[in-house]
Image: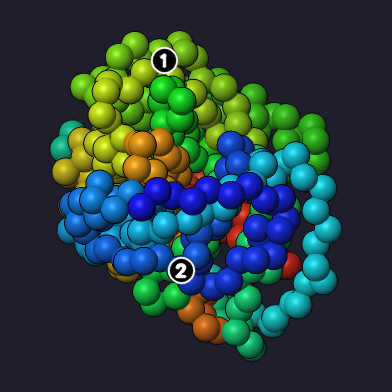
Amino acid sequence: MHADVTAAAPAELLSDYQPGAFFLSSPAGVVLADEPSAVHTTIAAATQALQAAGGVLAGAIPFARTAPARLGLYSSVRHGQPWHMATPTLSPLDRPDFSGADDSRDVYVAGVRAALERIQSAELSKVVLARVLDLRSDRPVLTGKLLERLVARDPYGYTFATDVGAGSLVGASPELLVSRRAGLVTANPLAGSAPRHADPVQDGRNATGLLVSEKDRHEHEVVVKAVAAGLAPLCARVVVPPTPELLPTRTMWHLSTLIEAEPLPGVSALDLAIALHPTPAVCGTPTEPARALIGELEPFDRGFYTGLVGWTDAAGDGEWAIALRCGVVDGTSLRLYAGAGIVAGSDPDKELAETTAKFRTFLNAIGLGDLT
Ligand SMILES: C=C(O[C@@H]1C=C(C(=O)O)C=C[C@H]1O)C(=O)O
């Protein structure tokens, strides 16, 4: 079975999206896949099925290595040109009433303080701590409408929806973990962040402050080194620019480094993604103590948040984004996630503010401001 790839306009793909399907809009183009012939919960089984039957694997991989993945095998996918090249018209917003409180702040600040004590004891140098926001809607949340809003606000990002069993994982991530296309591997680690500001002068200050912040540059460098080291055994000619650039989203500034490499023969986009996951951008350094500390300090299960969302085809090409600025929509309930990297010198209140700003990607798309 070969993947039957058809081309379509990106807006058409979005309007054809139905809950349960896989949708990804990235700077490289839009992908829609519906009706998987099988759904696999382990990467080994999914890879074997892809090799045996051909087609495209698409879906989500959780943060925890041992938790079940959700990877569909599709015999046909539809591709569209990049969203930022389209001029879509949005359908009217059916605006549900959401209720919920931002009640994880105190626990988060206490967690950051506890993490800073561990960092001082030199057991680890970075850990990424997250928190959740639980909302309820007065009617079932329409995933397609959410996608429309998210993609229109950040057309250069990685906007996705995919079935995760108990609902759909929906989000607009700024971060490409890795892609492999036409013999080129690209990874784009982000770490080090500052909120956008409505006043352009203050917004510019936030951006330049981030670019010169030693703490953020260190936080970023740790991730870049880990990604380059993860790619090295699977690639030739890993090219790492010496200094990061600023990457803006509608709500955040990030430090960003675009790494390019040549894949060794037979290495697929999924092989590369698995080798890199989780990077210190979403877990910490060293990985194992950071993973253990996340388990100790975060009072919820990350599930697919900070996991991976993407696809790989039988030829090994594909694209995997990190599941960030996202939530799980299940009927009338919506759980949003946001985290921040903690290193020596982190200020707990600033890290809390960073998570609040990261929630805005989703909250603003559903017509809400910060919750109290
Ligand atoms: C953890 C998140 O984002 C990650 C953490 C970042 C940081 O600490 O600066 C930046 C981008 C992401 O790699 C999130 O959005 O929830």
**Above-or-below relation of 334 to 357:** below
Residue 99 at x, y = what percent?
A: 61, 81
Under mark 2, the amino acid is Glu
**Above-or-below relation of 96 to 153:** below
Residue 220 at x, y = what percent?
A: 42, 28
Looking at the image, the residue that sits furthest to the front is: 1
- Whether the residue carrying mark 1 lies under 8 Å from ligand 1 is answered with no
Under mark 1, the amino acid is Val
- Helix, strand, or loop for circle 1? loop
Q: Which mark is residue 35?
A: 2
Question: Could one spot residue 110 in this view of the protein?
Answer: no
Looking at the image, the residue that sits furthest to the bottom is: 138
- Helix, strand, or loop for circle 2? loop
**Above-or-below relation of 337 to 275:** below
> Which residue is nearer to you in this view: 58 or 116?
58
Q: Which mark is residue 240?
A: 1
Q: Residue at x 27, y 63 (%)?
A: 40
Q: What is the C-alpha distance between the residues marked 2 and 1?
A: 39 Å
Q: Earlier in the sequence, mark 2 or mark 1?
A: 2
Residue 320 at x, y = what percent?
A: 42, 43
Residue 28 at x, y = what percent?
A: 58, 37
> Badge 1, how many Cα within 10 Å: few under 14, some, many 20+?
some
Question: Could one spot residue 208 in this view of the protein?
Answer: yes
**The C terminus is located in which quarter?**
bottom right
Q: Residue at x 80, y 62 (%)?
A: 90
- In this image, 23 relative to 341: left or right? right
- In this image, 312 relative to 79: left or right? left
> Which residue is nearer to you in this view: 308 or 317?
317
Q: Nearer the viewer, mark 2 or mark 1?
A: 2
